[in-house]
Image: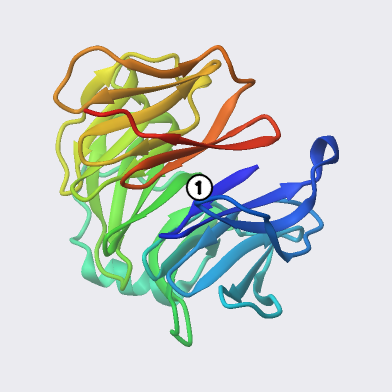
Amino acid sequence: MNLAADETKLFWVSSGYNRAPKGVFSVPKAGGTPTKLADVNQAMGVWPTKDNVYFYDAGPELFVMPKAGGKPVSMVENDALGPAAAGGDTLCWLGAFTPQGASEKRAAAPAPSASAQPEKFLDSDRRTIYCKKDGAARAVPVAPVTLFVQQLLVAGDRVYWLSSVDESIQSAAVSGGSKRTVASQVKGVTALVGNKSSILFVGIHGTEKGLFVVDQKGGAPRKLVALATEWTRDLAADETFAYYTLNRGLFRIAFSGGKPQAIFLGDVKAPKGTVLDDSSLYTVDGSYLRRLKKPSP
C-alpha cells in the first residue's frame, strides 16, 4: 500500500491483497468512510498535488484526475516510466528520454574536464525527469538522467533524485535548469524525504549506514543514527524530528542529536507508508490505517 497526504486527506492505492478493497482511495485525516476514486489493474503508486491526484497503473501508465472528482485521464504510457513524487502543485516523474531536454541541459552545463570519465551506459538506458504543475498544458523536461535513477523527491521548487551511476543526490528546479549535486558518496538509499531546509535519507554515505541529513543547497551529510538500511524504507520529517520505521516499531530522532525515541513498538504488524502533518502521524499497520498524535518535543 502506497500512502500519501495533502492538507486534509490521506490517499492510497491498493492491489487488493488479503481481500482489501482494490483501487485508489481517499479518506479525511479526521477519519471516516474511504472514498474510492478510481479502479486499478495493478497498484503502483499515488501522488496528490494541490488540485489533482496522479497514479500509476499497469502498463505502466500515468493517470491524472481532479480532486473534486471526475474520470481519470491517461497522461503517459510507456515502459520508461519510473519513480515519481509530488509536492505542492507539482508532480515529477522519470520518463522516456527527450533529446531536446538533454541538449538544453548540455548547453547550460560547463564543459567536462579532461579527466572526466566517459558515460558508461547505452542510449536505451537514457531517461528524462519531467515535472508538471497543476493547470500547465505540458510537462517540462527538467534533467537528462538514466534508468538507474532511484527515489524522487519534490521539495519547494526543486526536484531531488538519487543517481546510482555516480552515487550522489542531485537536484534541479522543477521549471528546468542546470543540475546541482546535493551530496556525494551516497548509495543504497531506501528512503528520501525533505522538510523546508533539509534533505534526509536512509542509506550509505561513504562507508557508514544510517539516517542522514544534508542541507538542500548541498554539503556533507550528517548521520543522525546508525540503521540497518535494508529494514528501513519509510521516513518522514518535520522541522525538528526525523521519523522512521524499523522492524515492528516507529521511532523519531531530533536533528539536534540524542537517542532515538520509540513512538510505538511491538504492538503492530509492520508499520509502513508513514506521513505526517503538524499534529499527527499516519501509518499503515497491516490492513489498518492508523493516526497517532505527535509526542511533545
Q: Residue furthest right?
A: 19
Residue 97 placement (x, y as % from top left)? 52, 66
- State the image quarter where residue 166 is shown: top left
Q: Residue at x 22, y 63 (%)?
A: 109
Position of the N terminus, as image quadrant, is: top right
Q: Amino acid at mark 1?
A: Phe
Q: Is residue 210 visible?
A: yes
Q: Residue at x 79, y 52 (%)?
A: 22
Position of the C terminus, as image quadrant, is: top left
Q: In the rendered view, does 235 fall on the left or right side of 21?
A: left
248 is higher (above) or lower (below) than 53 = above
Front-lying residue, 233 or 30: 30
Q: Secondary structure at mark 1?
A: loop
Q: Residue at x 56, y 67 (%)?
A: 53
220 is higher (above) or lower (below) than 75 = above
- State the image quarter where residue 28 is shown: bottom right
Q: Residues within 10 Å of mark 1 (few under 14, many from 20)?
A: few
Q: Residue at x 49, y 71 (%)?
A: 98
Q: Pointer 1: what residue?
A: 121
